[in-house]
Amino acid sequence: MTIPLSPFQAFTKEQSIVGRLLSSYTYIEVSLMFCVWGVRDDFDTTLKVMFRTRGETQRIDVADALGRQFYKDHNLKNEFSMAIGSMRHCLKIRNQYSHCIWWDDNSGKLAFANMEDIAKSNEHVSNLTDLKRRHVDPLLLVLQEDYFKYTDELLNWINFEGRLRANRIPSHAIPNPKQRKQPPLQL
């Protein structure tokens, strides 16, 4: 397998969307933090507890622990659980792209593989031909990007709806987004 230095030259649409997915994940984490801060009333502690924690999975777990009881008490348990599940799926999408190598395998689709997969093997590795090849195309990446947007909208709605139900704000105009199906991770 020959791996060109810049496989994205032939896949410019994919490059743009993957770049946006990788760079926008932190914004969704910040929306999750605001969702928790909205119920904890302590910005400094919420920020520090969530972002001093190493690793995105642990941040989601911390946010879940900090917010779950409040949202349960205000009849938003299911919605909060959906948002946490959506965050976890966004993280899977993000992680598969941030820990991979990309190439044009002449299939017409952009190929990628996780370098950690082959590194975890106990077998002797002499080249990259044993990488588990996956593919994406612009349509799939747009679905994933739309799911990131949905997750952010859901977190924002839960944040404001929770504060409304707790009588912390008089009203809000954030619409409850229509539930979306999780997009596949690859083709």
Image: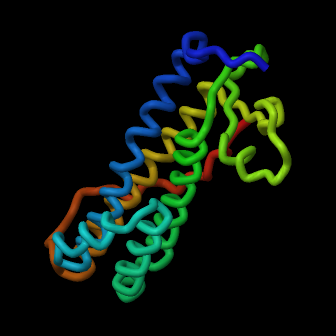
Of residues 105 and 2, which is closer to you in this image?
2
**Figure check: 179 above or below 133:** below
Looking at the rendered image, the quarter that the N terminus falls into is top right
**Figure check: 121 above or below 141:** below
**Furthest-top residue in view?**
10
Of residues 10 and 82, which is closer to you in this image?
10
Give the x, y percent position of residue 137: 65, 26
| Residue at (30, 74) in percent of width and height | 162
Give the x, y percent position of residue 164: 23, 74
Tell whether 59 sits left or right of 2: left
The coloring applied to the image is rainbow
Q: Quadrant of residue 69?
A: bottom left
Of residues 85 and 154, which is closer to you in this image?
85
Number of marks in the rendered image: 0
Tell whether 121 sits left or right of 68: right
| Residue at (61, 37) in percent of width and height | 100
Of residues 150 and 28, which is closer to you in this image?
28
| Residue at (63, 46) in percent of width and height | 183
Looking at the rendered image, the quarter that the C terminus falls into is top right
**Figure check: 23 above or below 33:** above
Q: Quadrant of residue 63?
A: bottom left
Give the x, y percent position of residue 95: 55, 48
Q: Quadrant of residue 45?
A: bottom left
